[in-house]
Image (cartoon, rainbow, N blue to C red):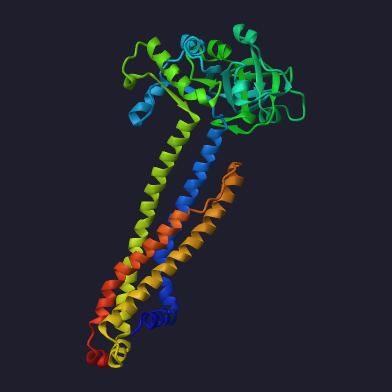
């Protein structure tokens, strides 16, 4: 019998029992749906994070305290106070790091903002006026504080557009005093709406002189971060090396593995995000793929039942000249057809669910969460489904091919 006839017979066998075929492929459908959903959502999350990182600019250098986290035990080191005013001055000294154009310390201040009994949760950030050029943020109304304000530890603040709307509504915010950790700050500027830049929501922020944050709000002398900008992308790598060398000399560090700081760029951050999301996606995909194996076992069981129910059919076909090989190929074709159909339906359902999840997350979180169809996931799903059908279909097909035609015809 030609392969074409075996395939036609297999298709007819699948269509003859539509309900059973649908139940048979259910495990494969669920498995492929899970794979597509996991990979699509993972790709969407990665794109979202990468877009935020890219908002920092390709020339940005981030210096943070503590050694670079490479395991759970390293995260405690980020609380280190290794970045202070002397480190900032050393980095911004052109004799040490000629490739840096400008830099600012960053001091994170936890807590909320309040005005006239109205309280909002927002990020309070201590910085210098250099942050405007690094992040490309400027006041839409009013002015930004000056170096004199930093020297004098002035109680002034520049707030984001969302903070202004939440606290003042349609009223003029300039000149008004808001409270940060029970200390009054005069609003001197309103930032132009900018959205998310890296981990910072510019619209939901209050920026104050870092010296004021250290002296009056936190009582500390160290910085959470030093953010710098190189003159050009071509000088970025050299600038990063100069920053590391300068800090190691300042801290008497000879072994890079003992650094009490770490330096990252946009490219470094993007690479780490891609690595982390890739590992998580692969892990979740492998877990989801287990259901394909479970589905394959289900197909094998159903196929064994089908072989028993179609014993007389097998006997009749053998009596009419079908060989063991013909019967074997027919039932293998049936198993593969079922699994491939299950894979296709799973890809379709997974795509629809992923698209729905992207819309829901975009609206619920007010984020630009893009839908991404994982072509590699779809290919893997179909191929794995076909392989599962082939592997788990061989045993039932062999059982069918070994049946004696005389005994099969007498089967009740």
Quadrant where the image shows the C terminus: bottom left
Q: Position of residue 37 (x, y in %)?
A: 47, 54
Q: Position of residue 88 (x, y in %)?
A: 49, 13
- Residue furthest front in the image: 234
Q: Where is residue 146 in the image (x, y as percent from the top left)?
A: 65, 12
Q: Is residue 82 left or right of residue 59?
A: left
Q: In this view, does 103 lie to the left or right of 308?
A: right
Q: How many labels does the image show?
A: 0
Q: In the displayed structure, would residue 104 be above or below residue 343?
A: above
- Residue furthest right in the image: 171
Q: Quadrant of residue 329?
A: bottom left
Quadrant where the image shows the N terminus: bottom left
Residue 108 visible, this angle: no
Front residue (pair 98, 85): 98
Residue at figure coordinates x 56%, y 21% from the top left: 231
Residue 145 visible, this angle: yes
- Residue furthest top in the image: 152
Q: Quadrant of residue 126?
A: top right
Residue at figure coordinates x 41%, y 60% from the top left: 381
Residue at figure coordinates x 54%, y 58% from the top left: 352
Residue at figure coordinates x 70%, y 20% from the top left: 189
Q: Is residue 39 left or right of residue 155?
A: left
Q: Position of residue 217 (x, y in %)?
A: 55, 15
Front residue (pair 61, 119): 61
Front residue (pair 189, 251): 251
Q: In the displayed structure, would residue 327 be above or below residue 99?
A: below
Front residue (pair 193, 103): 103
């Amino acid at each position: 019998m030609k392969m074409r006839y075996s395939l036609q017979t297999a298709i007819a066998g699948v269509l003859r029992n539509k309900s059973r075929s649908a139940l048979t492929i259910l495990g494969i459908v669920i498995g492929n749906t899970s794979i597509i959903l996991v990979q699509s959502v993972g790709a969407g999350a990665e794109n979202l994070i990468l877009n935020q990182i890219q908002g920092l600019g390709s020339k940005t250098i981030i210096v943070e305290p503590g050694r670079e986290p490479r395991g759970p035990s390293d995260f405690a080191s980020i609380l280190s106070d290794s970045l202070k005013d002397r480190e900032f001055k050393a980095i911004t000294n052109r004799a040490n790091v000629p490739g840096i154009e400008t830099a600012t310390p960053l001091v994170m201040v936890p807590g909320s903002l309040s005005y006239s009994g109205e309280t909002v949760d927002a990020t309070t950030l201590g910085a210098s006026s250099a942050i405007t050029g690094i992040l490309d943020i400027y006041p839409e109304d009013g002015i930004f504080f000056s170096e004199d304000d930093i020297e004098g530890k002035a109680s002034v603040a520049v707030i984001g557009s969302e903070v202004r709307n939440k606290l003042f509504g349609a009223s003029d915010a300039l000149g008004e005093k808001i409270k940060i950790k029970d200390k009054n700050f005069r609003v001197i500027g309103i930032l132009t709406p900018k959205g998310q830049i890296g981990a910072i929501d510019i619209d939901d922020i209050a920026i104050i002189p870092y010296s004021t944050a250290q002296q009056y709000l936190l009582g500390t002398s160290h910085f959470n971060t030093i953010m710098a900008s190189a003159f050009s992308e071509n000088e970025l790598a050299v600038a990063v090396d100069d920053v590391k060398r300068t800090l190691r000399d300042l801290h008497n560090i000879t072994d890079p593995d003992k650094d009490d700081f770490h330096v990252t760029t946009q490219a470094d951050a993007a690479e780490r995000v891609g690595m982390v999301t890739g590992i998580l996606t692969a892990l979740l995909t492998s877990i989801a793929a287990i259901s394909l194996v479970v589905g394959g076992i289900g197909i094998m069981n159903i196929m064994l039942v089908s072989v028993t129910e179609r014993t007389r059919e097998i006997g009749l076909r053998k009596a009419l000249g079908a060989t063991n090989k013909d019967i074997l190929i027919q039932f293998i074709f049936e198993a593969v057809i079922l699994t491939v159909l299950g894979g296709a339906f799973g890809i379709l359902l997974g795509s629809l669910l992923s698209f729905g999840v992207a819309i829901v997350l975009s609206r619920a979180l007010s984020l630009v969460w893009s839908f991404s169809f994982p072509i590699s996931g779809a290919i893997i799903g179909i191929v794995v489904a076909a392989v599962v059908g082939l592997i788990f279909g061989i045993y039932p097909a062999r059982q069918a091919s070994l049946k004696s035609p005389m005994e099969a015809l007498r089967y009740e």
